[in-house]
Image (cartoon, rainbow, N blue to C red):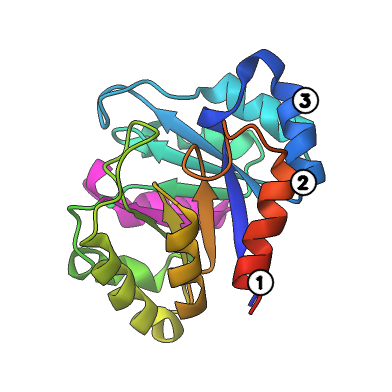
Amino acid sequence: MRIRFSASMMCANYAHLEQEIRELEDGGVDAFHVDIMDGTFVPNFGMGIHDLRYIRTATKKSVEAHLMVQEPRRHLNIFIDSGVDVLYVHPESEYHPSTTLQTIIEAGVTPGIAINPGTSVESVLELLHIVKRVLVMSVNPGHAGQIYLPYVGRKIGKLLAMKEEYGIEIFWDGACTVDKIQSFAPLGVNGFVLGTATLFGHGRSYGEILSELRECVSG
């Protein structure tokens, strides 16, 4: 299984965003991960629709939008029309998240759910029938650079045991350090969203970092 690495673009250098995108592409990143925050569902304002549209037009690689917003269904068409490949929504953000996911499916976009650290696997079991991806948050959403919450590892273990039954892919978001990638990639985690813990702000080329990550999980 080829492990997929997504770049968390909220951590990128916005003074040179086009250059960042080119260097990430050249370095071998698999996808661009865009965090949309509304200041209500999470206590922060993140990237916006204009950021998402620019990144979409600047790359041919996959673009994922992670909607950390209250009632995303009210604005879903804006994100669908931007041309994203994957849309993650939080089940807690909607009264009927299955309706939101069905809209995403009908639009031809890959549907995913993001699970907060305090959200149990059992509470989203029915949604696993209709999603393709599960994004497990190992930190509370809203801010970059947070510390890994160890109990999330047990949650990932539960989901890995269900992968085949539900036909889902599992991705990790938050505090993706090298040791966590080395530990969980061999267990079946399909991909990792890379931010300041591994990819950004380390004074090294993205190609060098991504090459080392791929080497450490290739066995």
Disc with the residue nearer the chain's start (2 vs 3): 3
**Which residue position is annotated with label 2?**
27
x and y percent of residue 36 in the render? 45, 31
x and y percent of residue 111 in the render? 49, 57
Most foreground residue, 164 or 80? 164
The mark found on residue 2 in the picture is 1
Most foreground residue, 48 or 77? 48
Q: Taking 109 as reference, is 169 above or below it?
A: below
Q: Is residue 107 left or right of residue 24?
A: left
The answer to whether the residue labelled 2 contacts the one labelled 3, judged by CB atoms less than 8 Å apart, is no
**Which residue position is annotated with label 3?**
19
* SS state under label 1: loop
In this view, which residue lies farthest toward the top? 15
Disc with the residue nearer the chain's start (1 vs 2): 1
Q: Quadrant of the N terminus?
A: bottom right
x and y percent of residue 90 in the render? 32, 47
**Kind of residue at badge 2:** Gly
Q: Give the range drawn in magenta.
A: 92-116
Disc with the residue nearer the chain's start (1 vs 3): 1
| Residue drawn at (71%, 18%) of the image | 16
Q: Is residue 153 left or right of residue 144?
A: left
**Kind of residue at badge 1:** Arg
**Kind of residue at badge 3:** Gln
